[in-house]
Image (cartoon, helix red, strand yellow):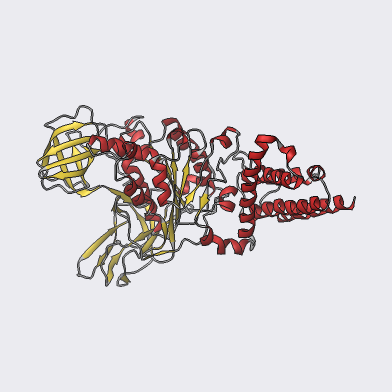
Amino acid sequence: MSQTVLEHGEIVRVSGPIVTARNMRAATMYEVVEVSDLRLIGEVVRVVDDVATLQVYENTSMVRPGDPVYRTGGPLTVRLGPGLIGNIYDGIQRPLKDIEAHSGAFIRRGEKTDPLDPDKRWRFVPKIKAGDAVTAGQVLGTVRETEAVELRVMAPPGLRSPARVQSIAPEGDYAVNDQIAVIEDADHASVPVQMAQSWAVREGRPVARRLPADRPLITGQRIIDTLFPIAKGGTAAIPGGFGTGKTMTQHALAKWSDADIIVYIGCGERGNEMTDVLTDFPKLIDPRSGRPLMERTILIANTSNMPVAAREVSIYTGITLAEFYRDQGYHVAVFADSTSRWAEALRELSARLEEIPAEEGFPASLPTRLAQFYERAGMVEPLSGGTGSVSVVGAVSPPGGDFAEPVTQHTRRFVRCFWALDRQLADARHYPAINWLTSYSMYLEDVEPWWKRTDPAWAELRNQTISLLQQEDKLQQIVKLVGPDVLPDSQRLVLTVCEIIKTGLLQQSAFDDVDMYSTPGKQMALLRAMLHFYERGKAFIGSGGTLAEVRSMAIVQELVRAKSTVPNDDEEGLRGLTKRVDEQFDRLERR
């Protein structure tokens, strides 16, 4: 954040987080200001002649007309460099751990703390030498940020070519504000480069080109990976009413997805839920490395009792941090919990700005703001080369679970995965409570080539499963009216198989050491065995057998329990499921 202080204005009106000031003719949109002698951080959101409207990211109690407003001349920025990983920030990138260390449990108004520790020294290893040609975004050197993350120090994204390195620091220990290189740009101007850089949060970072999202983000959650996959660089929404498991599902995705970096944004959530995140995440072990999960995680905590304007900017802070690591060639997953609380902040700010409301009081700009957030996801070729991606999963909290409300409806326009949480499934303790009839993924064709390399029959088995579940839903409507006895055994078999699929495949326990995560291979082995059971059962009933005989087979319970009894690495045990289906049907047919 720029600290250059220019001429100041004067407050003429205060309405909660919205402040109006005069003598601001030179102010620009989204310029950062410091309000009153408390130096509260704010941002210009409207300019009319010499009157500017500001949204303040801190509590404006005791701020009054006549107090000064100090301009800084720059937009709201975040500091990008070593030290981000493992940190916990508020919505405007103030490190909460550092604030607690010297201020206690409460953030003092006007508090300003360096987002990156200016005293900590990092081992810098140069990758180029003086005299080398360099382009925007090129890697100048590396820093081992954590055991899991190697940070790449890059040339400024706006560097004009042709450029060359005038000097670069030798290998050694440096602080984030130390100059580690000097580059001569196309205009023969010297550009100093520090280990850390700043970037405006509302501006997407540049890339060489965007790439198709053609590989899945493996989450280990069977209903997602097998039925409704998301691609790396993709977007997804998890809508659901209170208590349906939005936060729990995002926690599972954060822990198990094969993203390199996790950015978790607690945007307007209840304090107790965010407390669980802040206390649980540092204790979690990364299943890939066996080390703490925080070694590749950044948390942004902005609870519902924090200033509403900071909630509005928190998602931009999070997505900018994600883009920084994307530009280094990492695959980053961003979890925003929840975008509904963010939209409510927009609504409150819009009301105080006296804008004409649209649906349910939300601002008319809501669709545009949602689009601006989700469009920053994607698989790209960074300026540094290679590939990187930002995947965005946003939770949506529609009041009363009404998916027809504006935030959910507009979100559906801009995401390609929709994992709809179901109240009845949650009440039945079926988690993840994702409804397989109302959810969808538009990445199926994109990720199919990858899945075919894992299992050539993935698309066929997946489509057959969806078809069976849809048949089961129609049959259940008949059963509710007249009971199951009126159905022939062939249709009752569909009910039986779907119950096996729902319990043995789609339901997953986060507390079971075996069941909490499933590899793609295990997912397909379970699905293949269950569908093969259906095919053999259908043939057996068609040749005169009864459903009672089929349901009495031991393999029925084996298929249901296999998710917990057969480990991911037991390839022989997984293949044996289909073999035992055949063996038991063969014995049944020989009777």
From this view, report whether residue 135 is shown above or below residue 197: below
Furthest residue in direction top, as rendered: 62
**Quarter of the image holding residue 486?**
top right
In-front residue for pair 384/495: 495
**Quarter of the image holding residue 16?**
top left
Q: Is residue 77 left or right of residue 282?
A: left
In-front residue for pair 474/355: 474
Q: Is residue 332 left or right of residue 55?
A: right
From this view, report whether residue 582 is shown above or below residue 550: below
From this view, report whether residue 522 is shown above or below residue 100: below
Residue at 51%, 61% in the rendered image:
446
In-front residue for pair 284/221: 221
Q: Residue 448's x, y, as percent?
A: 56, 61
In this rendering, the count of numbered labels is 0
Whether residue 537 can be seen here: yes
Furthest residue in direction right, as rendered: 591
In-front residue for pair 149/472: 472
Whether residue 88 can be seen here: no
Residue at 56%, 46% in the rendered image:
437
Q: Is residue 230 left or right of residue 338?
A: right
Residue at 26%, 47% in the rendered image:
76
Q: Residue 549's x, y, as percent?
A: 82, 44
Q: Residue 531's x, y, as percent?
A: 70, 53
Q: Is residue 268 left or right of residue 568?
A: left
Q: Residue 371's x, y, as percent?
A: 35, 51
